[in-house]
């Protein structure tokens, strides 16, 4: 049996299976292509496979570049190639010096972002944080108080009538009416923003510098209708009128009280009561002296020794009389003594009947005086003995 001769194509033609490995087989050969290559249509060479054109999903977040037998990814900014450079993974910039952020760094796919804490604002460089002045940006932020800016926030200092919230960032109105039910005694309390109002009852008002309702003194203010002869008496919430002494009425209208007529006067029995507006006065009658409430008899005989010339002065309650000497007669009021010539002149004025009667009386008086004078001289004579 004759042995067959085999041809080693691989040995005869070194260019066979270019890009791969030529393997001789019985009566033929085959090409063994490496990874990233494929056999040519002629089956005689290994051609590079362009993986980038085979799939759009290669090198996501990057660019696929074909290489002989393989490919590599050139990643976009914010991504980095995998160790085999056949994929792109996100770069966590925040892990590297906090991404250059002042405060907060937030990583995102292919990028990152800087942010600031409350009370701070991100600057145009998108990395630096600056304090926000809330007081300047919003003047009414502490409505009912004063705003004070501090790093990263602010505080409210509240005015009277407001209370600060727990976070000290708001001023809350205090309802004084609920806190103190007696704050508007004699009135009704109405809460207002930062304060309250007392709607007072008639006769009460809110005085400056005080809280609540205070009695109005109508008497001091002149806000009353009392008579001019009455006294105004202030009472809580109102006033009363009372006629003064010497006047009677309801206080709104007062008329003079005539004390002399109603018996309330206290004048002496020897005085005359004289009524006047709102009062009265007492005047001692003639012959008496005093303040009118007490009147004493005037002793005219003692005060004036010249009274009853040619006679004797005799004092009497409220008056006096003259007891005349012989040859003199009392005047008609008995307060002086007249001689006989004066008496004769007076008798000429009377009728004849009157003259006779007058003479009869004169003779009688003369006889009486002579007898009295004789008696006095007789007594004196006896005394001298």
Image: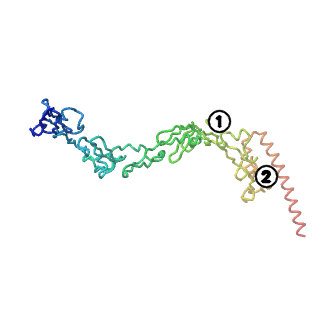
Image location (x, y in percent) of residue 108: 30, 41
For the image, the number of numbered tags is: 2
Query: Residue 214's quadrant in the figure?
Result: top right
Colour pattern of the rendering: rainbow
Query: Residue 4's quadrant in the figure?
Result: top left
85 versus 336 height, above or below: above
**Closer to viewer: mark 1 or mark 2:** 1
The outermost residue toward the bottom is: 385
170 versus 4 height, above or below: below
Image location (x, y in percent) of residue 266: 73, 46
x 29%, y 44%: residue: 113
- Residue at image mark 2: 316
| Residue in front for this viewpoint, 37 or 12 | 12
The outermost residue toward the top is: 41
Residues at marks 1 and 2, CA–CA distance in whole angstroms: 48 Å
* Quadrant placement of the C terminus: bottom right
Sequence-wise, the earlier of marks 1 and 2 is 1
- Horizontal relation, residue 369 to residue 156: left or right: right
Q: Secondary structure at mark 2?
A: strand
Q: Residues within 10 Å of mark 1 (few under 14, many from 20)?
A: some
Image location (x, y in percent) of residue 142: 41, 45
Image location (x, y in percent) of residue 107: 31, 44
- Residue at image mark 1: 250
Are the residues tagged 1 and 2 within 8 Å (C-beta)?
no
- Horizontal relation, residue 218 to residue 354: left or right: left
| Residue in front for this viewpoint, 325 or 203 | 203
Query: Residue 137's quadrant in the figure?
Result: top left
């Amino acid at each position: 049996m004759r042995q067959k001769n085999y041809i080693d194509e691989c040995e005869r033609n070194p260019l066979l299976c270019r890009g791969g490995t030529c393997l001789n087989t019985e009566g033929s050969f085959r090409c063994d292509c490496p990874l990233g290559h494929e056999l040519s249509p002629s089956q005689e060479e290994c051609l590079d496979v362009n993986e980038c054109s085979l799939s759009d999903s290669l090198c996501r977040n990057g660019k696929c570049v074909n290489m002989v037998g393989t490919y590599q990814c050139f990643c976009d900014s914010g991504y980095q190639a995998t160790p085999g450079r056949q994929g792109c993974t996100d770069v966590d910039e925040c892990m590297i010096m906090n991404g250059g952020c002042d405060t907060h760094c937030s990583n995102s796919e292919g990028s990152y972002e800087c942010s600031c804490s409350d009370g701070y604002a991100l600057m145009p460089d998108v990395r630096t944080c600056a304090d926000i002045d809330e007081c300047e940006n919003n003047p009414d932020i502490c409505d009912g108080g004063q705003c004070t800016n501090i790093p990263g926030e602010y505080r409210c200092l509240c005015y009277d009538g407001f209370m600060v919230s727990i976070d000290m960032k708001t001023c809350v109105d205090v309802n004084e009416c609920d806190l103190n039910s007696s704050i508007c005694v004699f009135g009704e309390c109405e809460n207002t923003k930062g304060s309250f109002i007392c709607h007072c009852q008639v006769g009460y008002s809110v005085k400056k510098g005080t809280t609540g309702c205070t009695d109005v003194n109508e008497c001091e203010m002149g806000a009353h209708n009392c008579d001019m002869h009455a006294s105004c008496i202030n009472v809580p919430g109102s006033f009363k009128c009372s006629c003064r002494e010497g006047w009677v009425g309801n206080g709104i209208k007062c008329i003079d009280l005539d004390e002399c007529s109603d018996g309330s006067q206290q004048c002496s029995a020897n005085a005359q009561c004289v009524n006047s507006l709102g009062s009265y006065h007492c005047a001692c009658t003639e012959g008496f002296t005093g303040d009118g409430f007490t009147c004493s008899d005037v002793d005219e005989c003692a005060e004036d020794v010249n009274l009853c010339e040619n006679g004797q002065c005799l004092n009497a309650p409220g008056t006096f009389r003259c007891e005349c000497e012989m040859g003199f007669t009392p005047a008609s009021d008995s307060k002086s003594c007249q001689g006989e010539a004066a008496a004769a002149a007076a008798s000429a004025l009377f009728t004849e009947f009157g003259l006779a009667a007058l003479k009869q009386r004169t003779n009688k008086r003369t006889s009486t005086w002579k007898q009295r004078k004789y008696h006095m001289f007789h007594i004196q004579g006896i005394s001298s003995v």
